[in-house]
Amino acid sequence: MKLNELHDNEGATKRKKRIGRGPGSGKGKMGGRGIKGQKSRSGVAINAYEGGQMPLYQRLPKRGFNKPNRKEFAVVNLGLIQKFIDAGKIDATAAITEDVMVASGLVRRKRDGIRVLAKGDFTAKAMITVTGASSGAVEAVSKAGGSLTVAAGDVAAE
């Protein structure tokens, strides 16, 4: 095979329709835009326009509020931490911090911090330090003989 013998598969490429290039092209004269009117002209953007009627997005009620500076946490369940400890990806004897969780692949990224929730069984005697935790998670870890401390001062454990 040579470079000059390379070609696409049959039907893989289609020639572009050349608009407004005479009657023989099949899209000549007005180029498929019809006669007159707003859409026949250039520079037209009428996406949500409904012909003078109040557009749908304006008719529907607006509700709620999205706080622009809200904190977004990476959420981890205790059952998943236990699974990683059992698999040997996290060392339970050493302190488990947010950096350890990221390095082990437990969470992809920290975001504004990591928040631990109480879903799942937790039996390891581990010291966990995170940005946030539910009260159930704190209770479950202390029941297993470990400790869960919330590091950041601005985010309290709920």
Image (tube, grey):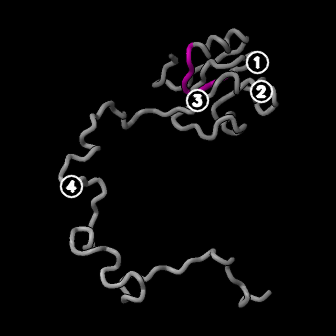
Q: Position of residue 133 (x, y in %)?
A: 57, 21
The residue that mark 3 highlights is 75
Numbered label attached to residue 124: 1
Q: In which quarter of the view is residue 12 placed?
A: bottom right
Q: Residue at x 24, y 47 (%)?
A: 55
Mark closer to the observer (2, 4):
4
Question: Label 4: how many residues lie within 10 Å, few (<14), some (14-19) or many (20+)?
Answer: few
Q: Amino acid at mark 2?
A: Ile
Does the residue at mark 1 contact the one at mark 4 (Cβ under 8 Å)?
no
Indicate which disc, 1 or 4, sits on the residue closer to the N terminus. 4
Question: Label 1: how many residues lie within 10 Å, few (<14), some (14-19) or many (20+)?
Answer: some
- Label 2 to label 4, Cα distance in Å? 62 Å
The residue that mark 4 highlights is 51
Question: Label 3: how many residues lie within 10 Å, few (<14), some (14-19) or many (20+)?
Answer: some
Q: In which quarter of the view is residue 121 placed?
A: top right
Q: Position of residue 69 (x, y in %)?
A: 39, 36
The residue that mark 2 highlights is 85
Does the residue at mark 2 contact the one at mark 4 (Cβ under 8 Å)?
no
Q: Main secondary structure of the magenta part?
A: strand
For residue 16, side relative to residue 85 (left or right): left
